[in-house]
Amino acid sequence: IFSSTAATFGEPQYTPIDEHHPQQPINPYGRTKLMVEQALADYERAYGFKSVCLRYFNPIGAHPSGSIGELPRGIPNNLAPYLTQAAAGLREALTVFGDDYPTPDGTAVRDYLHVMDLAEAHVAALRFLDKATDRQAFEVFNLGTGRAVSVKELLQAFERVNGIAVPHRIGARRQGDVTELWADPTQAEQRLGWKAKHSLDDMLRDAWNWQLRLAEE
């Protein structure tokens, strides 16, 4: 099972994005993930090696217990951990990279997925591979909720769910970021028997609980 990414698609030609969408990554992260996908496909054709590529959209959140979560080294590159660290006072402010995108509120749009749903997708993929025939030896699945959420929407939801204001400012667009990425998860539901169950509120509540637990240690 390979942890791939929606970044392999690049700037989308249509949304929601299904597995057949052209892959034209615009940053090194997406390009290197696509290279591995292609290598696995080649390996399957040459040797019949079974594999599944799971294209994550934007996993966030933590275990509901608050005992397991994301702790990046140094300054976080992803939105959710930077947001929780800004809310906790560990960062001066959250920077929203660009408010001039062609989206309803001007900020970039993504499909956020609870990490617990992502873990369940891995279990489903293992079961899928266990039952796979030679004709099903290499498969790819988009993992998301199918819901488009802007950066501003995520920020506002976090403040509402957790009852805390997050210091933030608007910055310039960040190179390598696309306007919007959100999934069509139909194939994962139909073929893996998997569907995201957690809401955006669940994701943001669990992410904050994890940050609070860290502060206690």
Image: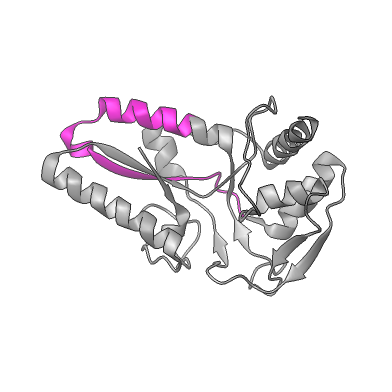
Q: Examine the image and state in which quarter residue 2 appears.
A: top left
Horizontal arrangement in the rendering, residue 9 relative to residue 136 (left or right): right
- Residue 25: x %, y % from top left: 41, 65
Task: State the residue in front, 128 or 33.
Answer: 33
- Residue 40: x %, y % from top left: 25, 47
Q: Is residue 81 above or below residue 150?
A: above
Q: Is residue 135 magenta?
A: yes
Which residue is drawn at the image coordinates 42% and 60% (left, top)?
30
Q: Quadrant of the C terminus?
A: top right
Q: Examine the image and state in which quarter residue 190 appears.
A: top left
Identify the image's colour scheme: rainbow, by chain, secondary structure or one colour.
one colour
Which residue is drawn at the image coordinates 37% and 58% (left, top)?
32
Q: Where does the magenta region start and end?
A: 120-148
Q: Is residue 177 above or below residue 126?
A: below
For residue 20, say whether it is visible: no
- Residue 43: x %, y % from top left: 18, 46
For residue 154, say whether it is visible: yes
Which residue is drawn at the image coordinates 23% and 37% (left, top)?
136
Q: Is residue 9 magenta?
A: no
Name of the residue lying farthest toward the left: 46
Q: Is residue 159 above or below residue 150?
A: above
Q: Is residue 210 above or below residue 103?
A: above
- Residue 170: x %, y % from top left: 76, 69
Q: Quadrant of the N terminus?
A: top left
